Structures are given as C-alpha cells and as structure tokens.
Amino acid sequence: FTMAAGGGAGNKTYSFKVVLLGEGCVGKTSLVLRYCENKFNDKHITTLQASFLTKKLNITGKRVNLAIWDTAGQERFHALGPIYYRDSNGAILVYDITDEDSFQKVKNWVKELRKMLGNEICLCIVGNKVDLEKERHVSVEEAEGYAESVGAKHYHTSAKLNKGIEELFLDLCKRMMETAQAEERAKGNGASQSTTSRRGVQIVDDDPQAATAAGGCCSSA
Ligand SMILES: Nc1nc2c(ncn2[C@@H]2O[C@H](COP(=O)(O)OP(=O)(O)OP(=O)(O)O)[C@@H](O)[C@H]2O)c(=O)[nH]1
Ligand SMILES: [Mg+2]
C-alpha cells in the first residue's frame, strides 16, 4: 500500500518507540510522567532498569501511538541501554542545565547511538530544569551548537513547570512521521527492504483488508 491508500490522509496509525536516556536525576521520569499523566513529584525515585508508558496523539488527522521507554540513569544500568534503544525510532537525551557532567553524559550517548544506529534514529537533546535558570551551568549556545553539529534538535524543558514538553514530543513525532513516510516512499519505489521493520515502526491501514503490519514491533496495537 502507499501513504495515499484508502482515499487520502487521516487513515493511518503510526506506532513509534521512543527512548529516554541520560544521567541519573536529570528528570527523565519526570518528563515522561508530566507528558503522559500531567503529574510531578518533587522526590527523586530512582528508576531501576526501565519503565514504559504510552501516549496517543492525533497529528493533522493522523493517529500516532507512542511507546515511551524511560530508562535508568544510574551508571550500573548503562549496559542495558541497547535493549531499549536498539529498535527505537527516536531518542530523547536529557541533561540537567545545572549539571555540567550530565551534559557530557549526553555527548557519550550521542556517540554510542550514532555508532550503533547511524543516522536512522531521530535525536533530541533536552536541557531540563529551566526553572532553575539562575543555577544554569550549561550554556545555551554551547548546547544548541553541539546539538546542531551532531544532527540533533535541542529543546528546553521544565518538568516541574510543564514547559516545553508538549512541543518536544510533538516535534519529535512529526520528524518520525516524515522519516516513516520517506521510508514508505522508498519502499514503494522498489528500493530494497526498508529499515522500517528493524526499527519497529508500524504503519497500519484502517481498512482491515489493506492492513499491513510492517514486521515485528514492540507495539501491542
Ligand atoms: N526544579 C526542577 N526539578 C526537577 C525537574 N524535573 C525533575 N526534577 C527533579 O529532579 C529529581 C530527579 O527527577 P527524576 O525524574 O526522578 O530523574 P531521572 O532522570 O528519572 O533519574 P533516574 O531514574 O535515577 O535516572 C526529582 O527530585 C525531580 O523532582 C524540573 O524541571 N525542575
Ligand atoms: Mg527515572
């Protein structure tokens, strides 16, 4: 099928997997909880291994199911990273703007992801805790310049004040949709097997007869 099958836009459901990575205590869980449940907890409850939440969106008439994987930042869990990022469509690399080391950690994740996955994953670099602007230790210019230099987009968020989070996920979804559409077109043009299935993207047509599940996917949809 093609993107236009079934009479035009509005009849597709995209399923994307997104992973959050970053040092402990930068606010990964807080960002996900704010986004999915509009909750915020002042206490730091360390994530063990990883946890998973889902979110449904409708973007210009197209349904998007997000599976959001919140990973543990503690160094002892680092080796589990590949389990969660391997088949992700997008990665959100979070640092705390008051903590320089956490920004260095983002750079390490970028290196690892580019090495393991190449350019096929949409990267977001997120400076969280912008409500603590007075204690900022990572310069905006440096962070944005770095993001641009590695082909990532940079965002400023506060899970505490619910700032920048909707924009972050919406923008990421749009980028992942563009990537999926480009891959679909490539497939339609007779290009070799798309990498879509490897990365777990699934585009399902509403028409059950035309429905196509593009390979093994993390989604239960
Ligand atoms: N001021 C402020 N504090 C925040 C913000 N986001 C998170 N926090 C606090 O930072 C601490 C750590 O937040 P978590 O979301 O648990 O951090 P995490 O990155 O999931 O940590 P690990 O699970 O250990 O990797 C908590 O005390 C949060 O309340 C924010 O935007 N502003
Ligand atoms: Mg956590």
Image: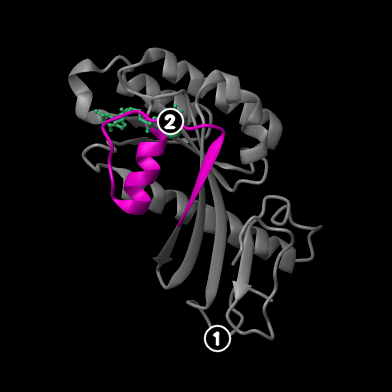
Farthest-out residue, left:
134
Q: Which mark is residue 169?
A: none
The residue shown at (61%, 46%) is 88
Q: Is residue 150 magenta?
A: no
Location of mark 2 (residue): 94
Location of mark 1 (residue): 7
**Helix, strand or loop at mark 1:** loop
Kindly report which numbered mark, 1 or 2, lies closer to the viewer in this rendering: 2
Q: Amino acid at mark 2?
A: Val
Q: Which residues are magenta?
A: 27-54
- Ligand 2 image position (quadrant): top left
Q: Is residue 37 magenta?
A: yes
Other residues around mark 1 within 10 Å, as few (<14) / some (14–19) / many (≥20): few
The residue shown at (50%, 19%) is 105
Image position, residue 72 (x, y; %) = 51, 30
Q: Under 8 Å from ligand 1: the CB of mark 2? A: yes
